[in-house]
Amino acid sequence: MSKIAAVRGMNDLLPAAATLWETLEARALDVVRAYGYQQMRAPVIEHTQLFVHGIGAVTDVVEREMFSFEDRADKDGKRDHLTLRPEFTAGLVRATIEHNLLYDAPRRVWCMGPVFRHERPQRGRFRQFHQIDVEALGFAGPDLDAEHVLMCRRLWDALGIGPVRLEINSLGQPDERARHRADLIAYLLQHEAALDADAKRRLHSNPLRIFDSKNPALQPIIAAAPTLLSYLGSQSLAHFERFQQFLRAAGVEFAINPRLVRGLDYYNLTVYEWITDRLGTQGTICGGGRYDPLIERLGGQPAPACGFAIGVERVVDLMRDMAVPLSAAGCDAYVLHQGGDTQLTALLAAEQLRDAGLEVLVHGGEASLKSQMKRADASAAEFAVIIGADEAVAQVAAVKGLRDRGVAAPFAQQRVVPLAQLGEVLADALEQISE
């Protein structure tokens, strides 16, 4: 049988690259906990109509990018129309409504995992990709919009990536967008002959998305088009100004981009993107904003909400490009043995070390101690714990420090430690090293 490769646009994460992901995920977890957000999970597969109603029937995501299919028929011959989630928000809102999560208080939630869009694979854009998603459900004020921006800034600082610039805009409310939309279509019709095929396709269905065009020939037309900001009423303008006031007070640098839109229909008022210049055309590493109409649109009681999503692959790519220091990839101890009874003793010693809070690898199978020491060193472990025949009889272990930590390292020279004290001694040694 010939080899079977991965599906196009869906990539394997190999052990050598996993540390970058683990570093991002660990620091993101620290940030969401620091702001009091709780984890929430929803299924990878949802009913197709959830995204049609939630995201918008004329968006690129729904029209061209979703992985949708008919389920097998049930006993009555009925087939469900299902879709692999192309984003998190609609599913989390569906779960919030279904389980009545807002009955007593607003909710701050987050989740992380894969999403799916049928796009042309390229750097930073895949058919299965991953997001870290944060949502504040039931909150109306621009203070939560600002809180989300601050969460992102804290994560970028924790990762040591930058510069990452923030662009913001306001999409106002539906009636304001409707007036702008009518004038925008009228303006673009005056230039219809100069529009490319994609712009003509969007002209009447979703004209705001024409602002996303990268076609150089369209840029002068886009630059002169009417901007939504000039159509905002007093309440929308007050919300946008208050949002900016929070950002300025927190020392967040930003630029207003009146052409900034989001690709999903549910947004209103605040929208923003975090952008890097180091990743080429796929430089947006995070996007979000407010989506007050969505909960009611999906059948819930009217309630405001806002959120953002971080593109994991793009941030990992940026971390790799900037050589971000990683979380420790190695284990604490690598346990060596000589087979037979020493292998049993090694297994029990490793369990004792794990009871003391250490991460431990036991050499699998049998090999010479010289070969095992090479494996121990390659594992990036702090200590080699050696249990030979003599050590097993005496119920001790020979412990050798594997890293150059200077003269203060307690195991620079090999030492013998009673097995009964092994966990406590190595836990103390690790604490000294960390200091």
Image (cartoon, grey):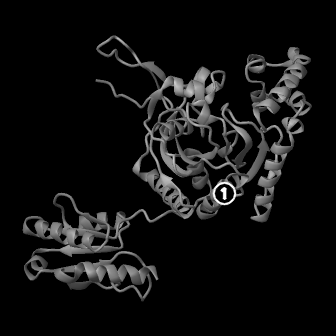
Q: Nearer the viewer, residue 30 or 141?
A: 141
Mark 1 Cα-neighbour bin, 10 Å: few <14, some 14–19, many ≥20: some
x and y, in percent, of residue 394 in the image: 10, 82
Query: Which residue is at 92% across, 31% downward?
Result: 224
Residue furthest front as drawn:
104
Q: Nearer the viewer, residue 57 or 143?
A: 143
Q: Is residue 196 left or right of residue 266?
A: right
Query: Which residue is at 63% across, 44% downward?
Result: 305
x and y, in percent, of residue 432 in the image: 41, 84
Q: Nearer the viewer, residue 86 or 330?
A: 86
x and y, in percent, of residue 275 in the image: 71, 48
Residue 264, quarter of picture: top right
Query: Which residue is at 89% across, 19% downward?
Result: 186
Q: Nearer the viewer, residue 406 or 306?
A: 306
x and y, in percent, of residue 407 in the image: 42, 88
Tag 1 secondary structure: helix
Query: Which residue is at 73% across, 19% downward?
Result: 205
Q: Quarter of the image for the N terminus: give it.
A: top left
Query: Callout 1, which amino acid?
Result: Glu
Q: Is residue 325 positioned above or below 200 on the image?
A: below
Residue that carries the numbered disc 1 in the rendered image: 147
Number of numbered discs on residues: 1
